[in-house]
Image (tube, rainbow, N blue to C red):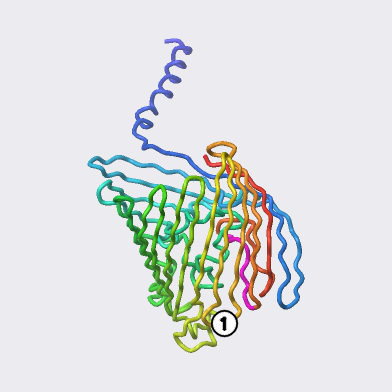
Amino acid sequence: MSKHTVLKNIIALSLIAPLPVLADTPNVNVYGVANVSYDSINTGTSAAGVQGTTLSKASSNASRIGLKGSEDLGDGLAANWQIESLIALDNAGGTFATRNSFAGLSSKNYGSVLVGRYDTPYKISTRKLDNFSDSIGDNRSLFGTVASTSASTAFDGRQPDVIAYSSPLMAGFSAAIAQVNLAETATTNAAAKATATSFAAMYDSPTLTASVAYETHMLDTIRVGGTEAAYRAGLGYTLDDFSVAAAYEKTSDTLGKATSLTTCSALATGADCFGHSASYLTAKYNFGSDAIKVAYTKVGALASAVNTGADQASLGYDHRLSKRSTVFAVYTKLTNETKANYGLGNAAFSSAAFTSIGAGAAPSAFSLGIKQVF
């Protein structure tokens, strides 16, 4: 046999050999969102007279990439998995598997269960109602019990160490429940007791969306101690090209005397520290490939301090270039009361996010961007 023939046989075998392995590989889908904007932010001036400034920057707004797959196990049962990562398109950074990442089982008749890192049912219950989601006008500046400002641990979160069950959809109704270990790296029994339980019931139809949710946190005695709880309700209605939605939440806690929390340490033991109410109202009108949207969010004063409320108003315009591509413009302004210190956006989803320069500041921002879904 000639050297030339031997070489051809080696090449042929190298191409054929992997085929049985590839044929047995489960279906893998690549997906993601590239969402970038150029933002001009005015930080405002604090109640103490700290002068603000205007800054401009490129921002990545919950841009992400993910891999997911499913294997049919027969009899309506499937094994599912997903790995989703945040990517920072404005500075070539990112975090691996810090968005919804899990493995689990699903059944057409009995629902699904997953284990990993995932949005809590409390968060899922009203997230779709936010017309400014993943932009500088996102209502999570004030809504969703902001950690260290209106809660010890954020309720509207994507938690690690989650085991969750979601029911099948029945006549538009569904429910979900999740148990969370808030102290994954705990080294003591006291710290290991930090847990969260989250529940939501939802209804969804082409014209009406409704939900109720409840979440409670049992915080460890080493770092904080005490408990905190929140409930919320959401309602959305669509008529032709016009839609309107509203959401409300109420929180309470027993964090008084928690020495690790400055806001709470001077209160009586077990007193309500961060308890407050928040409301959200939004509307959107679609015409052709364009849409105009408005939103208003208001958070009340904390149970432990007066003049700690704030509100935020947002105005936006979307132009759809294709089914997957949209350009947008957003203007938003957040006004703190004299002892409130909320900032625009949230670092968990936008690199445009920033904290307030001081209590009483009224930051505002104008944003131009493009969102590409793939």
The residue under label 1 is: 305
Q: Quadrant of the N terminus?
A: top left
Give the left or right position of residue 86, taking residue 15 as reference. Answer: right
Give the left or right position of residue 84, taking residue 328 as reference. Answer: left
Q: Nearer the viewer, residue 24 or 370?
A: 370
The location of residue 366, given as percent across then percent down, is 69, 55
The location of residue 98, given as percent across then percent down, is 49, 55
135 relative to 273, above or below: above
The location of residue 251, given as percent across then percent down, is 46, 73
Q: Residue at x 52, y 39 (%)?
A: 374
* Residue at the outermost left position: 75
The location of residue 8, given as percent across then percent down, is 45, 15
Q: Nearer the viewer, residue 6 or 131?
A: 131
Tell me which amino acid carries mark 1.
Ala
262 relative to 350, above or below: below
Residue 184: in magenta span: no
9 relative to 203, above or below: above
Secondary structure, mark 1, is: loop
Binning the other alpha carbons within 10 Å of mark 1 as few (below 14), some (14 to 19) or many (20 upward) gives some
Residue 343: in magenta span: yes
Task: Give the quadrant of residue 117.
Answer: bottom left
272 relative to 116, above or below: below
* Residue at the outermost bottom position: 268
Q: Residue at x 63, y 72 (%)?
A: 341
Magenta span: 339-347
- What count of labels does the image hold? 1
Give the left or right position of residue 13, taking residue 309 as reference. Answer: left
Give the left or right position of residue 286, taking residue 199 as reference. Answer: right
Task: Give the quadrant of residue 176.
Answer: bottom left
Q: Main secondary structure of the magenta part?
A: loop
